[in-house]
Amino acid sequence: DIVMTQSPLSLAVTPGEPASISCRSSQSLLHSNGHVYFDWYVQKPGQSPQLLIYLVSNRASGVPDRFSGSGSGTDFTLKINRVEAEDVGVYYCMQARQTPFTFGQGTKLEIK
Amino acid sequence: EVQLVESGGGLEQPGRSLRLSCAGSGFPFGEYVMNWFRQAPGKGLEWVGYIRTKAYGGTAEYAASVKDRFTISRDDSKSIAYLQMNRLKSEDTAVYYCSREVPYSSEFDPWGQGTLVTVSS
């Protein structure tokens, strides 16, 4: 199975300041079709998970442009330019390169 | 509006069975791979399995933790995916979510609101 390792597991950010979360996969997520099957999801308090970023760097519909994703075959980063109060929640990375699809442990973002 | 609604959760005893449903609306259900995920209380997300479209055989894949106990099926005429859970264990206690998988992409969007399954005697 592909192991996804996130860091940090928690962070507290002052509104308006940037935030960054890293995720590393134990194997390359590059498919022979050229796509890298890697996503970011956020689970806000009391809600279902929702898609933030897909295929490494594509923002899902409705996601503010202060969120950005980057990375290559095994190392990925989610950046929030200016954190807002509504961004609190747990952020998960996920690989869909091969089954079983696997998630990182989650990073809990809190507001200072 | 694209929507997924899970139902069928509840309290069940170890060893018994339960069937969850995932009703889709607002999109051509039969053209999408449907996935099931779960989240144990206070824990992270776990993929349970998926079912391919009929065009690709309608076959399913499962996580090792549920293989041979859980079965995913679909009724495209009703826009519903099912998760049949047999020989339930206490460790199956979780909120179960369904999500559609966008073709040729890694997008799992949207997710339903989830349904809670509690396995306890």
Image (cartoon, coloured by chain):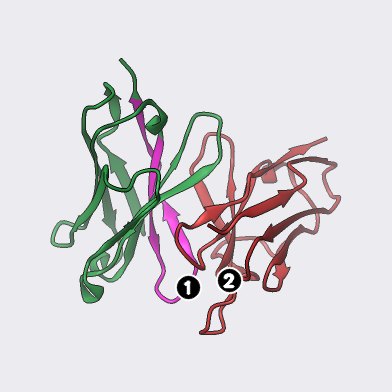
Specify whether B10 is left or right of B47: left
Q: In the rendered image of this protein, which colour is used for chain B?
A: green
- Most prominent secondary structure in the magenta stretch? strand
Q: Position of residue B118 (x, y in %)?
A: 35, 25
| As drawn, A90 above or below B90 | below
Magenta range: B95-118
**Chain ID, red in image:** A
Q: Is residue B81 visible?
A: no
Under mark 2, the amino acid is: Leu
* Mark 2, residue position: A55
Q: Position of residue B69 (x, y in %)?
A: 27, 42
* Mark 1, residue position: B105
Specify whether A45 is left or right of B19: right
* Element carrying mark 1: loop
Residue B98 included in the magenta stretch of the image: yes
Q: Image quadrant for the C terminus of chain B?
A: top left
Residue lying at the far left in this picture: please name it: B77
Q: Position of residue A52 (x, y in %)?
A: 59, 59
Q: Position of residue A25 (x, y in %)?
A: 65, 61
Q: Chain of mark 1?
A: B
Residue sitting nearer the eye, A69 or B65: B65
Residue A24 included in the magenta stretch of the image: no
Q: Image quadrant for the N terminus of chain B?
A: bottom left
Residue sitting nearer the eye, A105 or A67: A105
Q: Residue at x 79, y 41 (%)?
A: A11
